[in-house]
Image (tube, grey):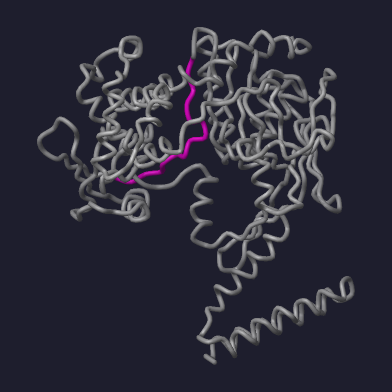
């Protein structure tokens, strides 16, 4: 046995005895169970066929223990924790581009607004062929992050090729703080209807939301479509701060209750006049979880507006983060949160993770919770809502379902590649009016059929049947990508895409009902 391993096990045994002795009075079996773990580790160390990696065994044991608790208590290794911390703080340092690897090259989807890449004129569709004089052909995503991210103030040289230019372009970019925006996009759908898409809850979310709402209000917004679809949640405190913007002062937004009362809290709205009481519709689906559900359930329980879309994920647990000495983290569920009506949205996980996630996603069996098992609660005005099943929309609208073949083709960047060709072939440039393009331009059937050819060029199979079934969706997606490429503006991408979004279209027809639902606030 290596001295380091022997020392490790000696320390582990000592720690286990100390822990067991401390807890023996409250749980006599815990000491015995701890001894079992140490015995197994000792046996593996001494008798396993080859020298074991103790670190990996310990990590596996920790992960295994947490998996037996609930689906959201997890162990986060050091490498993953750094990335999660950056996301939670809402920023990282680098050059500021979103990208895909297409045909073995880094292809820019869009520069992040206000980033060094944006300021220097990097455009959608640019392909990075060199980084600091080294070819980027065949590079992996992980390697892109390593070579383009870096400390603020450091420089990186890149060479790009751009459609329509004969020679490559050289850029020297000084890295800077790059915001990870929670507000994905916001703009006016018409003269009175604002649209805002929120994709996460980080340390900067409420600030971003406040700024976006103020901008929409200055543009004449008197009603809002608030899109929380596929927003997996984040900070509870930020969800409360965001919900507070929609409510008068003094109303319960959410309550949290722990096992012994030590983690109990009630969060109430505080600001009586943050924003006018414009009509509100919140969009949700099976990917709307946790902090998103806090907002959706508060809006529903207080009859502040309508919830439209599909059943939400059903995560009613609150996690606290506990750092370990090596920089890794345990995220442990320590409380449930409850909506203003008193309902818990958490879907049961007694039958294991597989069944839990099947119930949580509507496409995978949301009917698993029988009607007889639904627990009824009342909203502020007396409407019936249910607990233990996520947040059920006031109006269920199914989104467009595309074939698996089309999902694969989009993932293989075939759509993005064809959109770059179509953008280059079009008569439009960044000097033209987007509104004119949006009115006049359409993707033709012959353009669409080129997807089959492009798929074959990459050695991919794509069926004409899938193309026919998903034709309308694909034409819209291609046009949206073309708009992004020509104007280098992600807002134009969403303006095109949302024109054929069936959930958004249906939501806009429901504003009279949303107004009636919230009539006690007017």
Q: Is residue 420 above or below residue 440?
A: below
In the displayed structure, 287 sits above or below 522; it is below
> Can residue 237 be seen at all in this image of the molecule?
no
Q: Is residue 491 left or right of residue 488?
A: right
- The residue positioned 54% from the left and 62% from the top of the image is 77
In the displayed orientation, state which residue is furthest to the left: 166
- Residue at the far front in the pictured view: 465
x and y, in percent, of residue 271 in the image: 71, 24
- The front one of 373 and 196 is 373
x and y percent of residue 201 in the render? 58, 38
Front residue of 122/465: it is: 465
Question: Which quadrant of the structure image shows residue 491?
Answer: top left
Q: Is residue 344 magenta?
A: no
Task: Residue 51: tell me if it is visible.
Answer: yes
Rendered location of residue 65, percent (x, y): 69, 65
Task: Specify the quadrant of the image occupied by residue 411.
Answer: top left
Q: Which residues are magenta?
A: 174-188
Q: Give the residue drawn at x 34%, y 22%.
A: 479
| Quadrant hosting residue 345 | top right
Residue 260, percent across and down?
Answer: 86, 53
Q: Residue at x 18, y 32 (%)?
A: 163
The N terminus sits in image quarter: bottom right
* 192 or 347: nearer the viewer: 347
Q: Quadrant of the C terminus?
A: top right
Dominant secondary-structure state across the stretch colored magenta: strand
Left or right position of 482 against 321:
left
Badge count = 0
Above or below, 81 relative to 307: below
Q: Is residue 181 magenta?
A: yes
Identify the residue at horizontal 31%, vertical 10% (top origin).
Answer: 440
């Amino acid at each position: 046995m290596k001295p380091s391993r022997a020392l490790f096990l000696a320390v582990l045994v000592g720690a286990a005895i100390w822990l067991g002795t401390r807890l023996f009075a409250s749980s006599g079996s815990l000491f015995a169970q701890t001894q079992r773990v140490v015995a197994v580790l000792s046996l593996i160390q001494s008798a396993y066929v080859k020298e074991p990696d103790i670190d990996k065994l310990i990590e596996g044991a920790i992960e295994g223990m947490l998996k037996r608790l609930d689906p959201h208590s997890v162990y986060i290794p050091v490498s993953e924790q750094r990335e999660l911390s950056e996301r939670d703080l809402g920023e990282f340092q680098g050059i500021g581009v979103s990208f895909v690897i297409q045909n073995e090259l880094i292809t820019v989807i869009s520069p992040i607004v206000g980033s060094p890449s944006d300021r220097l004129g990097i455009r959608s569709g640019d392909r990075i062929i060199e980084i600091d004089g080294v070819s980027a052909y065949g590079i992996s995503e992980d390697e892109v992050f390593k070579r383009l991210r870096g400390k603020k103030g450091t420089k990186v040289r890149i060479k790009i090729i751009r459609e329509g230019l004969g020679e490559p372009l050289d850029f020297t970019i000084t890295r800077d703080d790059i915001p990870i925006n929670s507000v994905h996009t916001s703009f006016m759908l018409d003269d009175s209807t604002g649209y805002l898409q929120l994709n996460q809850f980080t340390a900067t979310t409420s600030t971003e939301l406040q700024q976006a709402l103020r901008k929409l209000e200055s543009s004449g917004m008197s009603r809002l479509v608030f899109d929380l679809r596929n927003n997996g949640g984040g900070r509870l405190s930020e969800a409360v701060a965001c919900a507070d913007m929609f409510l008068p002062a003094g109303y319960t937004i959410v309550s949290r209750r722990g096992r012994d009362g030590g983690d109990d809290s009630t969060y109430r709205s505080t600001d009586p006049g943050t924003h006018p009481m414009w009509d509100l519709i919140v969009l949700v689906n099976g990917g709307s979880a946790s902090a998103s559900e806090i907002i959706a359930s508060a809006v529903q329980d207080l009859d502040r507006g309508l919830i439209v879309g599909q059943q939400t994920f059903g995560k009613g647990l609150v996690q606290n983060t506990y750092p370990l000495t090596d920089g890794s983290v345990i995220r442990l569920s320590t409380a449930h949160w409850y909506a203003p009506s008193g309902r818990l949205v958490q879907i049961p996980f007694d039958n294991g993770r597989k069944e839990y996630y099947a119930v949580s996603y509507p496409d995978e069996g949301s009917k698993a919770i029988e009607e007889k098992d639904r627990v009824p609660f009342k909203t502020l005005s007396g409407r019936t809502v249910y607990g233990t099943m996520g947040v059920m929309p006031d109006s269920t609208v199914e989104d467009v379902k595309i074939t698996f073949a089309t999902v694969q083709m989009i993932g293989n960047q075939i759509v993005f590649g064809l959109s770059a060709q179509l953008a280059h072939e079009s008569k439009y440039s960044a000097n033209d009016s987007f509104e004119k393009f949006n009115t006049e331009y359409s993707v033709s059937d012959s353009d669409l059929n080129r997807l089959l050819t492009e798929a074959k060029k990459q050695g991919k199979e794509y069926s004409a049947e899938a193309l026919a079934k998903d034709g309308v969706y694909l034409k819209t997606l291609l046009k949206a990508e073309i708009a992004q490429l020509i104007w280098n503006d992600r807002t134009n991408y969403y303006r095109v895409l949302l024109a054929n979004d069936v959930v958004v279209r249906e939501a806009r027809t429901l504003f009279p009902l949303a107004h009636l639902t919230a009539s006690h606030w007017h």
